[in-house]
Image: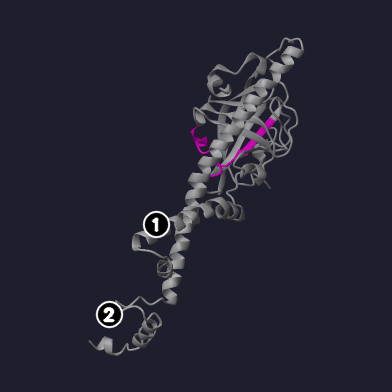
Amino acid sequence: MVGQGVHPSPAPYNRGMSEAVNEQPARRPRRKRVTVVGVLGEVLMTGGVIVLLFLGWQLWFNNLVSSNEQRSVADDLSEEWAQAPTETETALPMEPVDPGIPAITAAPVANQAFANLIVPRLGADFKRPIAEGVGTAVLDSTKLGMGHYSNTQLPGELGNFALASHRSAYGGAFHNIHQLVVGDAIYVETVDGWYKYIYRSMEYVRSSGVGVILPVPQDPTAVPTESIITLTTCNPFYSSAERIIAYGVFDSWYPRAGGPPAEIAAIATVVA
Amino acid sequence: MYLALWRLLPGPAWARVLQLVLLAALALVALVLWVFPVVDHLTAPQDVIVEE
């Protein structure tokens, strides 16, 4: 073949190499040459595999680890709150509690969990801690993941109790938020007891749509006459092009002394 | 690159394969424990909040 004749250059190179490792027999098949392109190809393929591994880690592994950790943080809070009143109960005479007047949640500390969110529609065991603030320290945390907009109201107050959490990755608490059905219960547990909200409507806005977390959503001048809960997360999945917003209206209040609402009794009481 | 690594490792072929598997496992552990969390915080997170 003509081709073999015009490529004499590899021969001296290979001869040189086999001289360097002269203990090897001359008949041994020639080793592949290490080329820049070959190494570059291997580096790029390795990079590609690492990127795929990272995506798997972020969207599956870390998501799973985060959602389990967030759940156990919420359980720890429930346990702590369940033990707190029993100590005071023995010390103080029990006062009759009027379940008609919900307790106003005490001002929370930034980046610390102060409540739990329980939404049966988002999963039979869906329970996540709510921390104060919506910075990355809360939202991207494996232990917290859900934050309260600190410029919005608290459970028990008139106005808007607005929360944010991820749709996918970082525990993806609001992954199935689009599956909420009008009338679904949304529970917020605090040291004082359980606040029951009823899911009412959904809205899609741009990321600049801050009107959704106003005391009366989308009405800056209105004076609130009811307590609502607002859940915000990104839409569509794996994108931040829009925000999906779920609204719930305050329905009833269950003081801790009276025990959790029947619907969530199984998840609200932590079996030690 | 990988050819050089293969030549560098001592022992028969099965021992080299075993060493490569161990090295790959170590690399994965290092990525998960240290590299991925750092990269995660450096890359723009999905925004879930509404803000002006």
Q: Mark 1 lies on which chain?
A: B
Q: Does the magenta stretch include residue A175?
A: yes
Front-lying residue, A73 or A113: A73
Q: Please count the marks in the image.
A: 2
Q: Please indicate whether residue A160 sits to the left or right of residue A118 in the image.
A: right
Q: What element carries label 1?
A: helix
Image coordinates for residue A148, horizontal then vertical, percent? 67, 36
Residue occupying the point 76% across, 13% down: A91
Q: Report whether mark 2 lies on the same chain as mark 1.
A: no
Image coordinates for residue B4, horizontal then vertical, percent? 43, 70
Q: Please indicate whether residue B2 sits to the left or right of residue A192 in the image.
A: left
Residue at image mark 2 = A27
B7 in relation to A53, above or below: below
Residue occupying the point 55% across, 17% down: A262
Callout 1: 10 Å neighbours few (<14), some, many (20+)? few
Marks 2/1: CA distance?
Answer: 29 Å
Q: What residue type is labelled 2?
A: Arg
Q: Which chain carries label 2?
A: A
Q: Is mark 2 on a helix, strand or loop?
A: loop
Question: CB under 8 Å between callouts 2 and 1?
Answer: no
Which corner quadrant of the image does residue A98 belong to?
top right
Q: Which mark is residue B51?
A: none
Residue at image mark 1 = B18
Which corner quadrant of the image does residue A92 belong to?
top right
Q: Can residue A101 be seen in this view?
A: no
Q: Magenta stretch: give its range.
A: A160-180
Residue occupying the point 32% across, 87% down: A7
